[in-house]
Image (cartoon, helix red, strand yellow):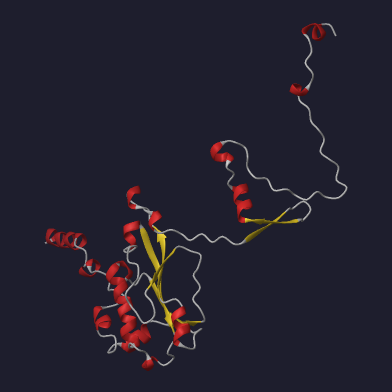
Amino acid sequence: MNLFLLFIVILFCITPPAYSQAEKAPLFPSQQLNYPVDNSTWFDSKFNVLYIDNYQFENVRSLCLPNGYAKHTLEDKSNLPLSKYGLMPLRVDVVYTHYPINKHDWRTNYYELLASRVAELIRLDSSLNSTDIEWRFIMQTQCSNEVQAKNLFHGVVVHYSHQVPNTMASLKPDKLPVPIIKPQKFQMYVARNNEQIVLDNSELISILYPESVYNHDLKQHIPVTPKRKNEPGCSKFTTRADRPKQSLWSRLFR
């Protein structure tokens, strides 16, 4: 009897429960995406809609996927799925406009268009259909007519982080270039006398990335600083090479 109970205990320990092997339920079930009008209350209760004037792109790791006004097909699908480049999605922003203001006046039904945009995205990258990822529906309100609405951004912005790849070949960051923003002018402050020097891009690049680093010709650009008033000139330092040459006789019998 004791051996039978011991066998039952061991069997229970090595057999995991059925619910632990079950996959996590997706964030968007197929029933809601296939019949969005019938499940409109589910969309309204499940997700909060953010109302902002104009969507501002954050200077973080993000992938911008436009789809256009009143459309759901993504214009660029080459960067999906993100796992192909060793990227892990963190947040998805579905961005569109609050025009027309009344949902019943939309050219395409609001819920059908929203569900089509979501379905198109998770069709290309099924990992986005997860409760571990934050989804936000964002409406832009800085538009009073259709022309203004078309000029605003419509699409999806996926925020991601890099994963540690199994092999270096699986990581291809060149596929997702980060935009470089170059302002017109930079302002550099000299800490010693608080003088302000305005430099353009070419001058600043030549200072930060001198050509001498690559070709060793020591011809990098050094900006001319204005001379302060009543400032004495620099002293001339001499070395042994600058001294006049002396004969061996004069150096031995001085």
Tell me how many marks there are: 0
Q: Is residue 228 above or below residue 12?
A: above
Q: Is residue 9 above or below residue 41?
A: above
Find residue 203 and report its horizontal and vertical position in percent.
Answer: 63, 51
Q: Residue furthest right?
A: 230
Task: Give the residue at x 56% y 60%.
Answer: 182
Q: Position of residue 116 (x, y in %)?
A: 30, 79
Relative to 242, 204 lies left or right: left
Q: Residue at x 31, y 67 (%)?
A: 127
Q: Nearer the viewer, residue 141 or 128?
A: 141
Left or right: where does residue 37 sit relative to residue 49? left
Residue at left offset 13%, top offset 58%: 3
Q: Quadrant of residue 8?
A: bottom left
Residue 49, image x, y percentages: 43, 83
Quadrant of residue 26 in the image? bottom left
Q: Which sits in the foreground, 241 or 61? A: 241
Decide: is 25 above or below 44: above
Q: Quadrant of the C terminus?
A: top right
- The quadrant holding residue 237 is top right
* Quadrant (top left/top right/bottom left/bottom right) for the N terminus: bottom left
Is 115 displayed left or right of 137 in the figure? left
